Amino acid sequence: MTVAATAPSSPHVMNTYGRLPIALSHGQGCRVWDTTGKQYLDALGGIAVNTLGHNHPKLVPALQDQISKIIHSSNYYHVPNQEVLAQMLVERSGLTNVFFCSTGLEANEAALKLARKFGHDKGIERPEIVVYEKAFHGRSIATLSATGNPKVQAGFGPLVEGFIRVPVNNIDALKAATEGNANVVAVFFEAIQGEGGVNPMHMDYLREVRALCDQRDWLLMIDEVQCGMGRTGKWFAHQWAGIKPDVMPLAKGLGSGVPVGAVVAGPKAATIFAPGNHGTTFGGNPLAMRAGVETIRIMEEDGLLANAASVGAHLKAGLALALKDELASGAVKEIRGQGLMLGIDLAQPCGALVQRAADAGLLISVTADTVVRLVPPLILSAAEADEIVAILCPLISALLKETA
């Protein structure tokens, strides 16, 4: 996210974020209020986290019930809702087994460990994993190394070895970069890059990579941390291509605000980890598992996949109509994405829009310097989508005119 740096909110909090001068107090549906009483339409959803919006009438009582029973127990013991949530994810993904953690970074780290162990089990001493330009997989040293953003990596070298970086949507480049390399064990990418600028992988490319992984005995690992959990109108964005990965990290929207991460694996990867190979203290705790179970149940009861598809298409069309002149001139290069994960790519940096939108009562983010990212709750209505267009597009037009 690109915003102007501000002073830390407290002298005791590390100054690691460029925060807006806003503290949110409470929310209802797709609306939030700050501590001064100002209201905002939330088109950021906690960065694709608040699947069910705020204060959902079905989720809140379920979480209150769970908190009154047990919040955490540890993985020394069985957690019944782990099996319930795992079955829900397996049924919706077509995969077979799940490991639960707490964040997307942890899920991606586990995926990288799975790939390396897969290689070592085949006798490969120095396994290598294909990753992508503009990718973002987290900020641990390993996931940072897999990430394709030099700005994020700066100051944290030496990076972890064992990664081969290629451009998106170019099967010839992938083949050329791996030709004759017996150390390659996996291909790892986001179905739609989030932090990299809302860059979707093409459906044909997904199918080509799946076929190549099958041909060369590699793991296909698809990071669905941001684009999964119904955001594009299917449970997982790769499903639009009719394929299945071998490894699929999840997080963000899985718990509707309660930290939940997961690694869902198919037959090729499901038995790579044995007891002692991987673990977590907080992952799979009873509160997180209840949040995941209830999120999926409510999504289905309320038809939120269909809502994400239809309202997302409505929002995308509204943006294109309101910005038709800017699109024609090239000042807006593209509006891309699917469902309720959309990016408006400007021909210039636009970080100033984050504060300007907030001033106008709209929460957004800017990523990759030039891309306005919209990832609202999946409960967004068509009327609220129209409101996003009405607030945001004049601000974009005004910014572009300032520098024309």
Image (spheres, rainbow, N blue to C red):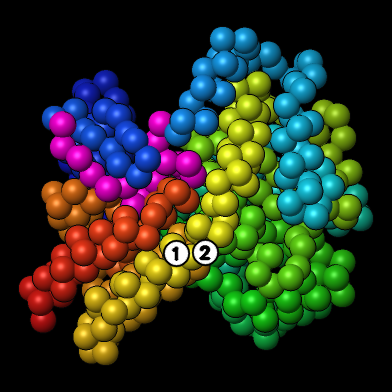
Indicate the position of residue 309 as horizontal and vertical percent values: 52, 64
Residue that badge 2 annotates: 309
Mark 2 is on which residue type? Ala
Location of residue 286 by image quarter: top right
- Disc 1, disc 2: CB below 8 Å? yes
Q: Amino acid at mark 1?
A: Gly
Does the segment drawn in magenta span residue 221? no
Instruction: Please name the residue that numbered disc 1 is placed on.
Output: 312
In the displayed orientation, state which residue is furthest to the right.
122
Camera-side residue of 196 and 224: 224
Q: Is residue 340 above or below residue 174?
A: above
Q: Residue furthest bottom?
A: 328
In the displayed orientation, state which residue is furthest to the left. 402
Which residue is drawn at the image coordinates 60% and 22% (left, top)? 287
Instruction: Decide if residue 142 is on the left or right side of residue 28.
Output: right
Q: Name the residue rendered at 23%, 51% in the picture.
A: 362
Magenta residues?
37-55
How far apart, in angstroms, are the residues tagged by discs 1 and 2?
Answer: 5 Å
Q: Using the image as rendered, state which of residue 117 and residue 1 is in the foreground.
A: 1
